[in-house]
């Protein structure tokens, strides 16, 4: 039986090709958000029962949660310090310096530096706990014994924010290192030759040739890593537990502690909605400030090869 033109159009409609992706999006992204919103406006507790709905959790989050100012401040310090000092600053430094090394040596260095990212989080956290152990058994304090007059350090209690920033930053720097290294290698060689002919030294090459080429990927890394830091908490939970007290409890970890440590599932769900709203607002703000629309604009000149 011949197939009509209408049947052919229906059979080859783009929606059929997008159906698997749309199904995954609905099941694993949209449905959890809807369920979270329902729980957030309920009174679900440890018994997992819902008896009423209301705005009590929203009012508590916005007006009466005494821990919220300290949580927001800790999150701001953690995200800003980790992003700019390590994820961007150290990532750019590693990308530029390792490309100046011989290729085999630079590849080996980047591979070794990338190991913490592919290491299980529990193992990575245990290594840090051993390094900063307050007794002489800890690696840091053991090394300090060779320096006369140096007191023993207890970073987990005295400087916990520094500890989680460094621990997370060393992992995050590897992400920027890989992306920016590929960008540096993609810079046409004739730009270096032209700059050297004009008398540019190594620092001038980095400033006027390398760094301008890194502008676009840096924008992407800044946006991606900001959102990643906002929602990540596993290293903090494993290394400091969010303590002492709430000193290193970021917003994402606060959601976890409220929901799963105290059993306040409804309030934890409301906090999760707040985190999602903050992420959307930050993304829109960064999109506008960094002019991300330029990233996806069509090239003004088409180069034919």
Image (cartoon, rainbow, N blue to C red):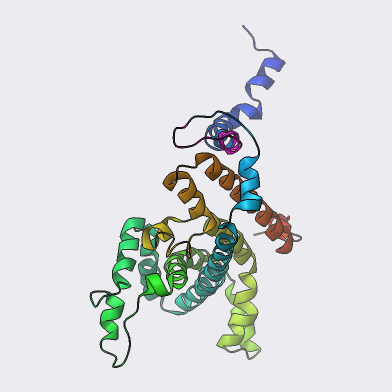
Residue 264 on image: x %, y %: 49, 42
Residue 44 on image: x %, y %: 52, 35
Magenta stretch contains residue 129: no
Extreme residue toward the left, this view: 137
Task: Write down the quadrant of residue 209 in the picture.
Answer: bottom right
Which residue lies at the image location 65% right of the left edge and 51% below the top edge?
Answer: 62
Image position of 127 with respect to 224: above or below: below
Which residue lies at the image location 65% right of the left edge and 80% below the top edge?
Answer: 208
Quadrant holding the C terminus: bottom right
Which of 124/177 is in front?
Answer: 124
Q: Which residues are magenta?
A: 34-48
Extreme residue toward the bottom, this view: 148
Q: Is residue 213 left or right of residue 133?
A: right
Which of 237/195 is in front?
Answer: 237
Which residue lies at the image location 51% right of the left edge and 76% below the top edge?
Answer: 93
Q: Is residue 120 left or right of residue 172?
A: left
Which of 178/26 is in front?
Answer: 26
Q: Is residue 303 visible?
A: no
Image position of 27 with respect to 243: above or below: above
Q: Is residue 177 visible?
A: yes
Quadrant holding the N terminus: top right
Q: Is residue 256 left or right of residue 155?
A: right
Image position of 148 with respect to 261: above or below: below
Residue 162 on image: x %, y %: 46, 73
Which residue lies at the image location 37% right of the left edge and 58% below the top edge?
Answer: 238
Task: Write down the quadrant of residue 260 in the picture.
Answer: top left
Magenta stretch contains residue 45: yes
Residue 221 on image: x %, y %: 57, 62
Extreme residue toward the top, this view: 1
């Amino acid at each position: 039986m011949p197939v009509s033109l209408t049947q052919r159009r229906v059979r080859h409609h783009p929606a059929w090709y997008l159906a698997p992706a749309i199904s995954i999006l609905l099941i694993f992204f949209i449905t959890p958000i809807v369920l979270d919103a329902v729980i957030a406006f309920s009174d679900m507790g440890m018994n997992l029962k819902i008896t009423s709905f209301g705005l009590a959790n929203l009012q508590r989050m916005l007006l009466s949660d005494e821990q919220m100012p300290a949580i927001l401040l800790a999150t701001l310090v953690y995200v800003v310090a980790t992003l700019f000092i390590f994820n961007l600053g150290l990532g750019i430094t590693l990308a530029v310096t390792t490309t100046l090394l011989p290729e085999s040596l630079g590849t080996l260095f980047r591979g070794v530096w990338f190991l913490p990212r592919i290491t299980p989080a529990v193992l990575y956290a245990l290594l840090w706990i051993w390094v900063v152990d307050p007794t002489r058994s800890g690696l840091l304090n053991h090394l300090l014994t060779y320096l006369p007059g140096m007191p023993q350090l207890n970073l987990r209690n005295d400087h916990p924010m520094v500890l989680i920033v460094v621990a997370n930053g060393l992992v995050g720097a590897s992400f920027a290192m890989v992306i920016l290294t590929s960008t540096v290698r993609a810079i046409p060689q004739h730009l270096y030759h032209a700059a050297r002919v004009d008398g540019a030294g190594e620092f001038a090459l980095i400033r006027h040739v390398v760094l301008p080429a890194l502008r676009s990927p840096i924008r992407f890394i800044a946006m991606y890593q900001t959102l990643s830091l906002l929602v990540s908490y596993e290293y903090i939970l494993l290394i400091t537990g969010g303590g002492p007290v709430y000193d290193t409890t970021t917003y994402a970890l606060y959601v976890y502690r409220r929901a799963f440590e105290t059993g306040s599932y409804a309030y934890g769900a409301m906090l999760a909605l707040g985190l999602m709203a903050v992420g959307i607002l930050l993304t829109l703000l960064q999109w506008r400030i960094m002019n991300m629309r330029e990233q996806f604009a069509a090239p003004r000149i088409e180069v034919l090869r």
